[in-house]
Amino acid sequence: MSDLVQLTKDNDVAIITINNPPVNALSPGVPEGIAEAIEQLQKDGDIQAAVLIGGGRTFVAGADIKEFGKMTAGKSRGPGLLPLLLKIEDCRKPLVMAIHGTAFGGGLELAMAGHYRVAVPNAQVGQPEVKLGLIPGAAGTQRLPRLAGVAKAVEMCAEGNPIKAQDALQAGILDRLIDGDLLSGAVAFAREVAGKPAPKTCERKDKLGAPEQNAPIFAAAREAARKKQRGMMAPLAAIDAVEAATKLSFEEGCQIEQKLFLECLFSDQSRALIHVFFGEREVARIPDIPKETSVLPVNNVAIVGAGTMGGGIAMVFANAGIPVLLKEVDRAALDRGLANIQKNYANSVKRGRFTQQYIDERLKLIEPTLSFDGFSGVDMVVEAVFEGMALKKEVFAELDRVCRPGTILATNTSTLSIDEIASATSRLPSVIGTHFFSPANVMRLLEIVRGQATSKEVIATCMQLSKRLGKIGVLVGNCTGFVGNRMFGPYRREAQFLVEEGAGVEAVDKALYDFGMAMGPLATGDLAGLDVGWRIRKEYRHLQKPGIRQPFAEDKLCELGRYGQKTGVGWYKYDEQRRALPDPEVTQLVRKWAAEAGIPQRQISAEEIVDRCLYALVNEGARILEEGYALRGGGPMWYADTVGLKTVYERIREFEKRHDEIWAPAPLLKQLAEQGRAFAEFNKPRTATA
Ligand code: NAI
């Protein structure tokens, strides 16, 4: 038998143990091992029943996600899990699945093929395939409604969220919860059912409901999926597959599921989501900072500035259970900051995200202050004062005086040089950028900005800290705008140019929203505050090359006090509920400004809007990659690869002819396009610093 699966005996009960650390994924060898164990225990006359359990910290946590990539690359399309699951279900001796940790995806499909399921109370089960743009592919959509009923199965397969053991027991997915030792509890359960006919999930029909009961469930689920998971095909496919379970035989339902599974598997959506899945894990790998690099303790922090960002960052630390000292310049600013935090928390209680008790505990962790007293006792400081070099340097010089050696001094600056800020201190290795995105307590991305002299320990600590804070930390180099804002600049520049050339405000946003962006670029500007970019542009105006076209619309809107949502008017006008309404005045204003600037007006297609905005991201991203400020390509580079770099390059050349040197193709893009290669293949040893 394969070393991944062991068969042992406890008198009359066989025990199959899967040992494929760390998560007992169903990698090649595991299904074969289980099949062999089933054959052996069937032949063994002493055996009356069997238990299948995971060794180590979990049951089977899921399929091996790498296998999906192999399948789409045409490398392996074995028989899949289905034949094994039928073999398990056909076993004449009752088989009890014993679950601890998680039984997700293929793990739950495996468990449902058993005759009974028991679990420890803190176990979780789920069909999270939709999160990878897939649906269950081993009869999950067929067995789950038979155990849990149609409504529950639709919810679990279409939304992908895990449920706790207690809920799974109530839903009928589990037969019993085991307090105490799982294996002995499962063996005792197996003895209780030994000798009785083993019930097959696939033969059950009692929970499949009647068409008139089911129709509204499917209709509501489809509507919710179209709204909450806009544009995604997998949730709708999952609902179709569960519906097939209610209308067809088990075998026919499995065939429908297979067909839908393969359609999803070979879609760009699933490939992209699987890329994101691995990408989010890969960002932790930094070539010159080995895993063993020692990290510093971060048991308490201080934050300077309780504005939009400082307040949000205080919540992020408090939510992770880390005490925060929150400093402001005066009482009024401090009170404003605290009131915002309270308002934010109150909203999450209203929306049911947190309980009042949870909030009260978080608020106790945030200690407001007007002085630097107490800063000598913290492990880390995050500065979030106004964006201005002189002020930042003043604050860092003060931090250098008051903080003990070794304290991590982090800045939340979005554009300023980490090295210049660090120069105000006598401890360059301790200074780093931790660039949170707004709203800080919501956005998952955290750019960790490496200065010339930032120590490896400080970087490793911040990378690890990002996980504790529930963020995806990405190490980037110290260039203007770092990676996120540097790419965002040309993207929003094009959005403005398009409007200045005659595209409607809503048309620009709609084209990108329909493409799949969460919001259009102009509405995003209104949300973040148009004045933020305006102030930054004023700061950098002296660096602009004369004769190069610059967007003017947002600067002019700001001059009129139209800052976006915060002033009630920006690209759009906003009602009391902050709903965006089209504003004909903006259209007239932009037409007038365009006429003054001599910009001819024309019809612009949605295709051109998408290409210009997206390729502006891609072209800047290519420069960032080549310059080494990012270690690896992100979403836009992935998108460009799927389009084909030759196509992207040629389109950018067209834009260059029309719009001049701002569209000069990045040398890396040109090179890869000419070589017929992709960004995914670009691999140069880099350390995210120049
Ligand atoms: P803000 O204007 O909302 O807040 C700044 C706060 O700092 C004010 O409350 C001010 O009273 C306080 N402050 C100024 N000097 C201080 C001092 N010496 N000691 C203590 N507090 C002081 O600004 P916001 O938007 O929170 O920005 C803060 C930093 O975060 C800036 O560097 C900005 O570039 C960056 N950032 C802003 C983002 C945004 O979307 N607003 C996103 C990411 C970064």
Image (cartoon, rainbow, N blue to C red):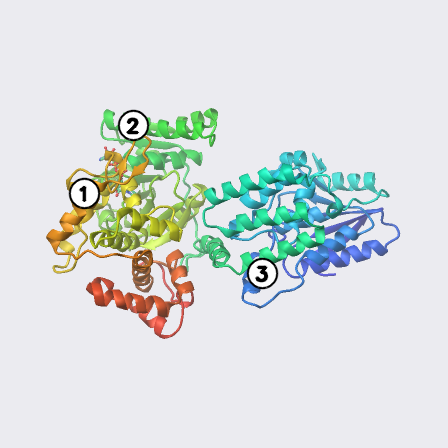
- Residue at 56% x, 47% y: name it: 128
- Residue at 48% x, 50% y: name it: 232
- Residue at 23% x, 38% y: name it: 398
For marks 2 and 1, give the CA distance. Answer: 37 Å
Residue 355 in view = yes
Disc 3 residue type (three-letter): Glu
Quadrant in which the N terminus is drawn: bottom right
Along the polypeptide, which appears first: circle 2 or circle 3?
3
> Taking 461 as reference, is 193 left or right?
right
Disc marking residue 369: 2
- Tell me the quarter of the picture where residue 483 sits: bottom left
Q: Nearer the viewer, residue 290 or 217?
A: 217
Disc marking residue 67: 3
Camera-side mark, 2 or 3? 3
Q: Secondary structure at mark 1?
A: helix
Disc 2 residue type (three-letter): Thr
> Residue farthest to the front?
212
